[in-house]
Image (cartoon, rainbow, N blue to C red):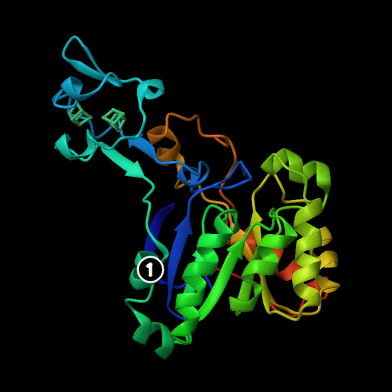
Amino acid sequence: MIFAIKPFEIHDGDGIRTTVFFKGCPLRCQWCHNPESWSPKKELLFDAELCRDCLKCVSLCDAHIQSGTSHLFERKNCTACEKCVSVCPSGALEIAGMELSAEEIAEEALKDELFMKGSGGGVTFSGGEPLMQVDLCVDVARRIKARGVNLAIDTCGAVPRSAIDQILPFVDTFLFDIKAIDEQTHVACTGVSNKQILENLRYVDSLGIPIEIRYPYVPTMNDMEDERIACFVKDLKHVTCLRVLPYHSYAERKYARMGLPYPLPNVPVPTKEEISAVVEKLKKCGLANVSTF
Ligand code: SF4
Ligand code: SF4
């Protein structure tokens, strides 16, 4: 179950990359900009701002209700069967989630193979958490590596050790998120403990695989974690860089399309100066390669 395959990505590892977004995630980060990645199942997204109340969908399904001359969406009645999507003239209805075979995913992901190879790029598995579907990941990865293409795995790390072991033979680089070192802060930010995540990170490091650490910096949530993260990362041996990912609120409309309240309505977006100061602080903690996007 995939929710997107995006070509020409430049923020998901080295060079030009195609990123495969796997659906399903064990974390619920408050700042997540891909809430459609959380569930491992297909979901219907409804954009009330695009709906023109044409009512063409109403006769198709109990989830679409006529109220006077207006349309109402009753999400609990929706089974994501997709029937209504094609009748909507305004693009208000969209399905998040595609069931594709490993062969189909690899074929799509390798379309820009020449650009990827020419730029030192490759394919990145992201999500959601790709390793929640580790058997599918391995099947796609085998096809990608058979063509000599670089493979990066963008993981939250909250997966069984066995999933890491299964994918290891195919991975060139891990992109590994650290949201917080303090466990209580981590639970408050993501809903889960960071114990397994940090153990898996130490394990991957012990195997000598290059790791890019990613620190999503979210004011009022985990902005006090910078020095703790620096101390933790300094003890790792194979970190190529630490990237600070500044919080943004572009995903607000996605939450509305899923019928969810936006979790961080009052969190300020950090300024460039604030992010530069965080980068400098991390460098002063002794980390050689710290950057941001
Ligand atoms: S996706 Fe299927 S179940 Fe959901 S609202 Fe549309 S027609 Fe109904
Ligand atoms: S078909 Fe689309 S535009 Fe028409 S009522 Fe349904 S959701 Fe709204």
- Residue 103 in the figure: left or right of residue 179: left
Q: Position of residue 142 (x, y in %)?
A: 50, 76
Q: Which residue appears at 50% of the width and 81% of the height? A: 145
Q: Quadrant location of the C terminus?
A: bottom right
Is residue 6 among what the camera can see?
Answer: yes
Residue 154 to residue 147: above or below: above
Residue 218 to residue 113: above or below: above
Q: Position of residue 286 (x, y in %)?
A: 82, 75
Quick check: which quadrant has ligand 1?
A: top left
Q: Which residue appears at 55% of the width and 61% of the height? A: 135
Residue type, numbered disc 1: Glu
Q: Position of residue 181 (x, y in %)?
A: 81, 54
Q: Which residue appears at 23% of the width and 38% of the height? A: 85
Mark 1 highlights which residue? 103
Q: Residues within 10 Å of mark 1 (few under 14, many from 20)?
A: some
Question: Element type at marker 1?
Answer: helix
Q: Position of residue 72 (x, y in %)?
A: 28, 19
- Residue 199 in the figure: left or right of residue 43: right
Q: Nearer the viewer, residue 271 or 25?
A: 25
Q: Nearer the viewer, residue 94 or 272?
A: 94
